[in-house]
Amino acid sequence: MIRRLLRERDIDSCRTASIQMNYFAHGRSFLAAPYFLVGTAVPDLIRVAARKSRVREKHAQEFLADENPAVAAIAAGIAQHHVDDAWFHKTSVFAQLSLEFTVLARNALPDDEGFRPSFLGHILVELLLDSALIAENKSQLDSYYQALADVDADLVQAAVSGMATHPVERFSECLRTFQCLRFLYDYLDDVKLCYRLNQVMRRVGLPELPGSFVGLIPRMRSTVVDQRHALFTPD
């Protein structure tokens, strides 16, 4: 049975409440709205479940008035994710930190003249921002995972399949794994964060990071903690 579905006016209020970038930053404002919350995670999770598939904002918008309030909430969360990313990635603070971290990564990987340092500079701002937000209130992350446990994963897969650019057959499995592994807690630990980074490197076909890379994380972490409020401030 579907639990805690959103009413239409609840969806409207959720869509305007967030200006945020990785899983937790995208979803932490919507802990009381599980289907909206899972929607905010869909554009990232779908890249794990089906690498060629995407869910664009325009595709999600077609389902905002769906007769099933859970589907409408998922669509609204997906749309919110794209709104958040568009705003966040245009801020001068994000650009500044991404460049700073890219330079640090390139210096630490002197033989790498490819895409990896700039990719790291981008995602480390997002992952370390999640870490900073989690550290401020770890119980919110407990609630985040509980909210994901409250959704019907098969219903989510059916909804996402209707919005996606390519078939998605493993999304429910991917969602359950994401909820069970709870790897967002690993962002709080430098060594575990590097382990998760190497998982991402393998998934996108980039070389894994050497063990020495972990020595950069404390400096980057401190910078993001200092700038976390500025990252949410419009220019």
Image: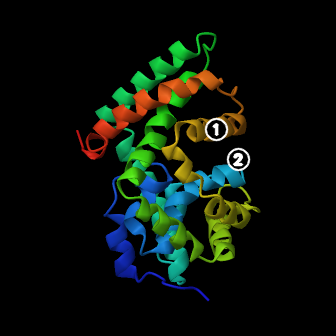
Image coords of residue 159 (percent x, y)? 62, 71
Kindly identify the residue that appears in the image at 49 percent across and 45 percent down.
188
Image coords of residue 201 (percent x, y)? 66, 34
Q: In whole angstroms, how far apart are the C-alphas of marks 1 and 2?
A: 24 Å
Which comes before the other along the chain, label 1 or label 2? 2
Q: Nearer the viewer, residue 137 or 110?
A: 137
What residue does disc 1 label? 195
The image quarter in which residue 27 lies: bottom left
Label 2, secondary structure: give it: loop
| View extreme (right): residue | 169
Image coords of residue 124 (percent x, y)? 49, 35
Indicate whether 69 appears above or below 128.
below
Q: Nearer the viewer, residue 134 or 1?
A: 134
Indicate whether 33 appears above or below 58.
below
Q: Amino acid at mark 2?
A: Lys
| View extreme (top): residue | 111
| View extreme (bottom): residue | 1
Label 1 Cα neighbours within 10 Å, binned few <14 / some 14-19 / many ≥20: some
Q: In the picture provided, is 186 more to the left or to the right than 232?
A: right
Q: Is residue 219 visible?
A: yes
Q: Amino acid at mark 1?
A: Tyr
Kindly identify the residue that appears in the image at 27 percent across and 45 percent down.
229
Label 1, secondary structure: give it: helix
Q: Which mark is residue 52?
A: 2
| Quadrant that contains the C terminus | top left
Image coords of residue 207 (percent x, y)? 70, 25
Q: Nearer the viewer, residue 84 or 30?
A: 30
Kindly identify the residue that appears in the image at 46 percent across and 61 percent down.
141
Label 2 Cα neighbours within 10 Å, binned few <14 / some 14-19 / many ≥20: few
